[in-house]
Amino acid sequence: MNDGTVLHDISPQNADASTNDPRSIEDNGDRVSSNPNDSSLPAVDGGKDAWLFLAACFIVEALVWGFPFSYGVFQEYYSTHDTFKGSGNIAVIGTCAMVILGIFLTRPGNPSLTKDQGIMYLDLPIVFGLLRRWPQYQRLSTTGGLITMCLALGLSSFATNTTHLIVTQGVIYAIGGSFAYSPCIMFIDEWFNKRKGLAYGIMWAGTGLAGVILPLVMEWLLNTYGFRTTLRVWSVSLFLITGPLLYFIKPRNPNTPAHSPHAKDFAFIWTSTFGILQACNVVEALGFFLPTIYLPSFARTLGASSTLGALTVILFNVASVFGCVLMGAVVDKWHVTNCILISTVGSTIGVFIVWGFSVSLPPLYIFSLIYGLFAGSFTSTWPGIMRDVKKKRDNADPSMIFACLAAGRGVGNVASGPLSEALIHGFPWRGSAGFAYGSGYGALIVFTGLTAFFGGSSILGRRVGWL
């Protein structure tokens, strides 16, 4: 539920009854009635309004993150056309815009592409903190963020150098995207309780879908009409598609207070539950993004064309759509460490056994599907982490727990950039090890597998009673 949300005035004679009503949902120290007989508010965990809200969030998720998904295509275009050809700052544009997963035409060994993914994660605690401090602006945030993104895309179409692109397509778009996306996370706790994990999983599946479709669309537009027309077309399309959805992205309870009493409560970060789960989250992030960046170049060492190499990332994104939804459904029913264990086992086996022994394209494609299904669903365990942390610290704001988890993932992601560069420098083990381990990517494969394995260490913390 939205922090500080008030359903209705509770008279003294009814206060105890309301507090003990099992049909109420507690979140952020406040109570929001989910009584199905209360006609003043729509139903929780289902009903037309809840599903329309989730559908709108799914599309916003796909479109806000979809454009950064496509930056690999833009980078290739900028690097090969006269206006920006030869510039040394082209990758910085993507660093600011946070290119996440699914990058087409990724250049081997370019660590800046992993930094892209970390920055948007890292700014979420700031954005969430501001919107929690002044919750009356939460719904306006989506509108303002959308307008900012569209203006950034429109302005970037007039760029004549990479500095213009960094400011518009990079920084301004990223800021707008953060503010447009954040209310989706904040409001989802109000609309879903028992199905919260499933709701998050469905929403996050939008990123995988975007990673399949939008890069292909952007590549066709760029090759056919050039970058100026492409950016203008996407600016208008983004507004026309997303604008009508803003009506549905709203809190379940419209009576939002002027200030949130728990906006600055970060005491949960000192609990052992959050500490262990966050540490595993960071470790997993150190290696998670590397396959989607290096698989296309690895596929080319097996004789694949650029198109067939890019297919590895497409398959990853397709599988992650299903993985996110399935994991979201499971985390509502099982303990979060069991869900993380499923992701860990599948990812680790996929990396060490399937990728590690891939010497042709078919097993590599199988690995892409396995990795997308298991590793791609890791963040869908976050609702379970939010639930367990809140049990330890009742006043914790779930959206701030989410923001801190996102920041932790960003830290691991940014650190993975220079680490991955060192791991493939000089292509170690080439010719001295068997199968894919001797391809020059062996150290990278082992690193990815180890981070996937140790990212599931939270199960041990539960066994010894620390969770």
Image (tube, rainbow, N blue to C red):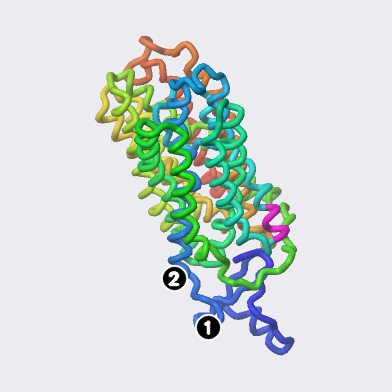
Q: Residue at x 46, y 64 (%)?
A: 195
Give the labeled residue for mark 1.
39
Residue 171 highlighted magenta (yes or no):
no
Question: 237 or 268: nearer the eye?
Answer: 237
The numbered disc on residue 46 is: 2
Whether residue 333 is visible, yes or no, is: no
Judge the density around disc 1: few (<14), some (14-19), many (≥20) Cα neighbours within 10 Å. few
Q: Residue at x 52, y 65 (%)?
A: 247
Majority secondary structure of the magenta segment?
A: helix
Judge the density around disc 2: few (<14), some (14-19), many (≥20) Cα neighbours within 10 Å. some
Q: Position of residue 6 (x, y in %)?
A: 66, 74
Position above or below: 29 against 215: below
State which region is magenta: 129-134
Q: Position of residue 96 (x, y in %)?
A: 59, 34
Q: Secondary structure at mark 2?
A: loop
- Quarter-of-image position of residue 386: bottom right
Residue 131 highlighted magenta (yes or no):
yes
Nearest to N terminus: mark 2 or mark 1: 1
Q: What distance separates the C-alpha of mark 2 from that of mark 1? A: 15 Å
Q: Amino acid at mark 2?
A: Gly
Q: Position of residue 273 (x, y in %)?
A: 62, 50
Circles 2 and 1 in contact, beta carbons < 8 Å = no
Q: Secondary structure at mark 1?
A: loop
